[in-house]
Image: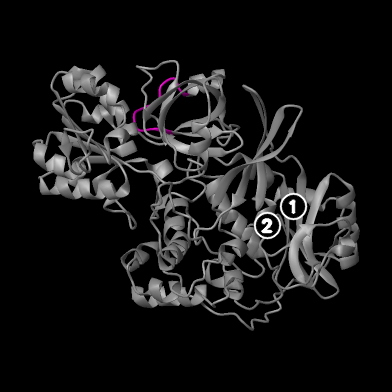
């Protein structure tokens, strides 16, 4: 295996920061661990659990300007704001790379591709760091992932005695590793095997969800939902969005407008409210059901991958303990 | 669509005509001012929709209510002043700039309907996306069979395209019936819901008849039930759906009905397709 020390990684990260790359890595932000841009390798966390938010904001920002528009009388100019910065995400957990691959299935592979997302993704290199164990609420191994899964990464790092094992997964990964001196070692990287929370959650095939649409499961779990939307906010695969205009100022007779895309949530009460007042999902169970069906029935049927990577963030974030693993177990039991 | 295209970027356009067509309802005529936009809108189909931008207020989806044959120089939409974007549009004047994305979605299969009798049911502003169907039939009259148009609104002042009623009603092999929901001092015609009118007119059902309906979800729901009662079958009923969508290209998630997206799988569906959706409110 290829080996590198933490100090060597830091030197390399600092050289990336100095180069054309924006470097994003897990940082401590007021007690939360978040993937954030860094100014120096000193800010990077190496020993962390699961960041509190996924990395989807690196390709699909929570708020993103799509167009800058200037209007003066009957004259309008509009400029697309397409990202052009090269970006490296360091320390990405494999479930978050998996989450990006899930969104790719819709935003890249389904025609027409999303121009903004594509620009971000093509300019991003994913340097993952395997989880040394599974964390509270995690179940990646039940939905096709693993704590040390390299599949959706460009580079996978695994912690070993005295440093990290380095595996270049893609050509992009090999390119980003130029400039990092790797030592060849005989030893093989092993998974530490601490599986404190490792558990198996049953995944029910999409067609077996269909007869359960009117099942009491949705009332039972949905009635205590607070419509707070935190589950969609922390989710690496939730990708609903709204588009709004914002007037940023009027200068010299020119109105400056930004058209902005913002994250949206199908669990929000007004999500399906139309002009005139009709709401086709008026209750919390209606909306909760839609979220679960999207992940386990609609998304895999329409676009291929499951809409869940088992990161467990919604499990630990829900203020009323709605637990996706319990829902999956209930669905599996009802589908028997 | 070219790989490099950005489907979220509108074509620029300007309002070349604004007409009051009912209380709080205006017809907007939009000229595409860029060559790319003119090419994109050279051959749109009945049932397709656009996103119309009132820059600064936002954009919203509207069913196209014109045909390229009748208005080669502009695209028309009918807008009810109900929300943020529609209100901004209602405040605009001729010459004002707008943005247009589209044409989006599928369309009424007018070729499949050729040779068949047609029953068109438009409730309220739901009549807007059916006007291109009416125009297509009237402009190619020999291609289609007997056509029955049933038109409805809550009140007389909410009926849309009243200036075309005479034209529609006097076309060959075409009948036109209109109703309003409740008695009104200015109204001496039919009173009652569109479903009552449908039962009263009772256009013959059969293998060779296609129905095309649009209106609020509750109206589509009861129109479908009434059609079933009158002997029509779901696989010969067309409808067009809408939702408060944000992209129009199957990405934003807003408009799903179960596993289908109104924007990219529709907006036009046969009722037997809708019957298979896990989720539907029509």
Residue A151 appears in the figure: no
Disc 2 or 1, which lies upstream in sequence? 2
Q: Observer-nearest residue: A191 or B146?
A: B146
Secondary structure found at label 2: loop
In the displayed orientation, state which residue is furthest to the front: B185
Residue B44 counted in the magenta span: yes
Please tell me how crowded label 2 is: few (under 14), some (14-19), or many (20+) other residues with Cα within 10 Å.
Answer: many
The numbered mark at residue A153 is 2
Name the residue rendered at 37%, 66% in the picture.
A209
Query: Tag 2, which chain?
Result: A
For residue B94, side relative to residue B204 (left or right):
right
Q: Position of residue A18 (x, y in %)?
A: 90, 49
Q: Where is residue B279 in the image (x, y as percent from the top left)?
A: 34, 57
Name the residue rendered at 43%, 46% in the picture.
A275
Q: Where is residue A134 in the image (x, y as percent from the top left)?
A: 65, 76
Callouts 2 and 1 close, C-beta under 8 Å? yes
Residue A184 counted in the magenta span: no
Please tell me whether residue B134 is drawn above or below residue B191 in the rendered image.
Answer: above
The numbered mark at residue A173 is 1
For residue B206, side relative to residue A14 (left or right):
left
Q: What stretch is highlighted in magenta?
A: B41-49
Are callouts 2 and 1 both on one chain?
yes
Query: Tag 1, which chain?
Result: A
């Amino acid at each position: 295996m290829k080996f590198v020390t933490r100090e060597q990684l830091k030197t390399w990260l600092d050289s990336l920061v100095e180069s054309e790359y924006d470097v994003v890595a897990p940082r401590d932000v007021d007690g939360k661990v978040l993937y954030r841009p860094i100014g120096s390798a000193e800010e990077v966390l190496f020993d962390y659990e699961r960041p509190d938010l996924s990395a989807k904001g690196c390709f699909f920002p929570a708020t993103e300007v799509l167009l800058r528009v200037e209007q003066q009388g009957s004259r309008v100019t509009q400029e697309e704001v397409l990202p052009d910065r090269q970006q490296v995400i360091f320390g990405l957990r494999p479930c978050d790379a998996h989450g990006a691959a899930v969104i790719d299935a819709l935003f890249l592979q389904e025609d027409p591709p999303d121009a903004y997302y594509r620009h971000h993704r093509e300019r991003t290199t994913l340097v993952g760091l395997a989880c040394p164990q599974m964390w509270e609420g995690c179940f990646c191994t039940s939905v096709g992932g693993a704590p040390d899964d390299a599949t959706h990464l460009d580079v996978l790092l695994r912690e070993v005695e005295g440093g990290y094992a380095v595996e270049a997964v893609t050509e992009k990964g090999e390119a980003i590793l130029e400039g990092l001196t790797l030592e060849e070692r005989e030893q093989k990287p092993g998974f530490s095997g601490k599986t404190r929370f490792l558990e198996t959650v049953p995944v029910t095939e999409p067609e077996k969800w269909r007869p359960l649409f009117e099942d009491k499961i949705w009332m039972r779990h949905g009635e205590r939902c607070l419509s707070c939307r935190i589950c969609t906010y922390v989710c690496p695969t939730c990708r609903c969005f709204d588009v709004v205009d914002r007037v940023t100022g009027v200068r010299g007779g020119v109105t400056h407008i930004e058209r902005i895309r913002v994250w949206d949530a199908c669990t929000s009460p007004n999500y399906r409210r139309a002009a005139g007042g009709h709401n086709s999902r008026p209750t919390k169970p209606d909306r909760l059901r839609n979220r679960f069906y999207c992940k386990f029935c609609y998304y895999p049927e329409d676009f291929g991958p499951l809409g869940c990577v088992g990161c467990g963030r919604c499990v630990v974030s829900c203020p009323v303990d709605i637990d996706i693993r319990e829902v999956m177990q209930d669905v599996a039991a009802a589908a028997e | 669509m070219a790989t490099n295209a950005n489907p979220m970027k509108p074509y620029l356009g300007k309002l070349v005509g604004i007409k009051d067509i009912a209380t709080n309802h205006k017809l907007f005529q939009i000229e595409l001012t860029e060559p790319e936009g003119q090419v994109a809108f050279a051959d749109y189909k009945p049932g397709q929709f656009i996103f119309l931008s009132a820059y600064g207020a936002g954009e919203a989806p509207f069913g196209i209510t014109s045909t390229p044959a009748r208005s080669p120089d502009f695209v028309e939409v009918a807008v009810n002043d109900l929300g943020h974007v529609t209100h901004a549009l209602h405040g605009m004047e001729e010459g004002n700039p707008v943005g247009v994305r589209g044409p989006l979605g599928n369309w009424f299969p007018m070729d499949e309907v050729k040779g068949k009798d047609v029953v068109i049911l438009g409730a309220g502003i739901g009549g807007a996306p059916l006007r291109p169907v009416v125009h297509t039939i009237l402009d190619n009259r020999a291609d289609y069979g007997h056509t029955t148009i049933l038109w409805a609104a809550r009140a007389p002042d909410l009926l849309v395209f009243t200036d075309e009623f005479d034209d529609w009603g006097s076309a060959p092999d075409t009948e036109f019936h209109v109703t309003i929901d409740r008695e009104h001092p200015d109204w001496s015609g039919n009173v009652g819901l569109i479903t009552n009118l449908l039962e009263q007119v009772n256009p013959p059902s059969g293998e060779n008849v296609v129905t095309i309906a649009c209106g609020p979800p509750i109206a589509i729901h009861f129109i479908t039930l009434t059609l079933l009662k009158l002997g029509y079958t779901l696989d010969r009923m067309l409808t067009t759906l809408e939702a408060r969508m944000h992209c129009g290209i199957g990405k934003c998630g807003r408009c799903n009905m179960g596993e289908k997206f109104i924007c990219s799988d529709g907006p036009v569906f046969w009722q037997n397709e809708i019957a298979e959706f896990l989720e539907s409110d029509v």
